[in-house]
Amino acid sequence: MKKIVVLIYGGKSVEHDISIITALQTLRNIDKFYNVIPIYIGRNGVWQTAENLSDTSIYSDFENKAKKLRYVTVISGKPYIAYRKNGKYSKFQVVDFALLCMHGRFGEDGGVQGILECSQIPYSSCNIRSSAITMDKILTKDILVSREFPYLPYYALTYYEYKKDKDKKIKNILSKLKFPLILKPANLGSSIGIKICRTKEELIEGIEYCSKFDNRILVEKYLEDFEEYNCAAIFINGEIKVSDVNKVTKKDDIFSFKDKYLDDKVKEQENIDKKLILKIKNLTEKLYSTFDCFGVVRVDYIYDKKTSKVYVNELNSIPGSLAFYLFKDLSFKDLTTCLIEEGLQRAMKEQYVSAYDSEALEVFEKLNLENIKK
């Protein structure tokens, strides 16, 4: 019997459209052995499904173009989804697994993972804890420091605190870091909301800009002469498998949203130093283990050309296109099969004791009765 796999994508995220692309790629490549039910989360956060979700053109006018649209909800405590129409639940469907193609907030940050765990539905990505940590650039930095991974100097800024005494915060930043600086919203991906600052005035403007996306802002040392590299890892047959190393090509100072997703030109990769490849691969495997990752995770690196040092930039717990392009010896179909089967095995192994019968209620009731008698 075919396993029922729900493929969840979309969501209330700035990476909403990229999530759709990842989902469409997955739908077209996933093994026919699975019975796939695509669940599209709209920009308003509503879960829904339709007959023609594999048609790219419907997403420009979803409400009118979706055929046989039905709303979907997850049932708490049971691995079921329910279809809702005209305010009534019309059908309940058992679910074996959830393949996540979510990017950004409310999907890559542990939000959806929490919903699925409450419903006892196994899923393909990192767990709640590691998803939340890797999504948060400041928390990621703190762990990099504590575990002695290579990192660029940074300052963690909270906008609420900044507003109380702006001059003091600016002074604190500049006492620890020198220009140029790069500002990043702590919980945002795809180079959106990022500002490079070379003066005090630009720093002040950058903080105000980033605060539109997040209350917590990462202020980091910006390198003028650098290269960027990607490497991914996935758990296969009980071992961490590390991908090839990819050198990023970009047109501007930063690897922008457009460079990542909207440039359809074939990017020719230069030869990469073998020692650098080995270092990045070793770091990727160690990071995957340290952050307790599952599923496929892409790590982004910054290489300082002046000092020949490599730094960990960030971890992506559900990378765009599931980073299939980094695994030259693993097809997209095999990668999705691996995510499903490894995720199912992990769920079986992690069936820990979640409830424990104690005498606490009996003791409480007894004490309560004694107090009433008094």
Image (cartoon, rainbow, N blue to C red):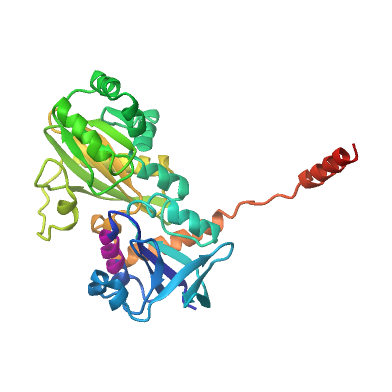
Q: How many marks?
A: 0
Quadrant assignment, res 45: bottom left
- 338 to the left or right of 197: right
Q: How far across and down, in percent of the image, does residue 134 sit?
A: 37, 43
Q: Residue at x 15, y 39 (%)?
A: 227
231 falls in the magenta region: no
Q: How far across and down, in percent of the image, does residue 259 sit?
A: 15, 52
- 217 to the left or right of 70: left
- 250 to the left or right of 25: left
Q: Is residue 100 above or below residue 149?
A: below
> Front-most of 346 and 200?
200
Q: Is residue 283 above or below residue 257?
A: above
Question: What is the quadrant of the C terminus in the image?
Answer: top right
Q: Is residue 354 above or below residue 56?
A: above
> Front-most of 363 and 31?
363
Magenta extent = 17-25
Q: Main secondary structure of the magenta part?
A: helix
Residue 159 seen from this side = yes
Q: How far across and down, in percent of the image, does residue 319 sit?
A: 30, 54
Q: Residue at x 15, y 28 (%)?
A: 201
Quadrant assignment, res 333: bottom left
> Front-most of 247 and 315?
315
Q: How far across and down, in percent of the image, does residue 282 sit?
A: 31, 40
Residue 279 seen from this side = no
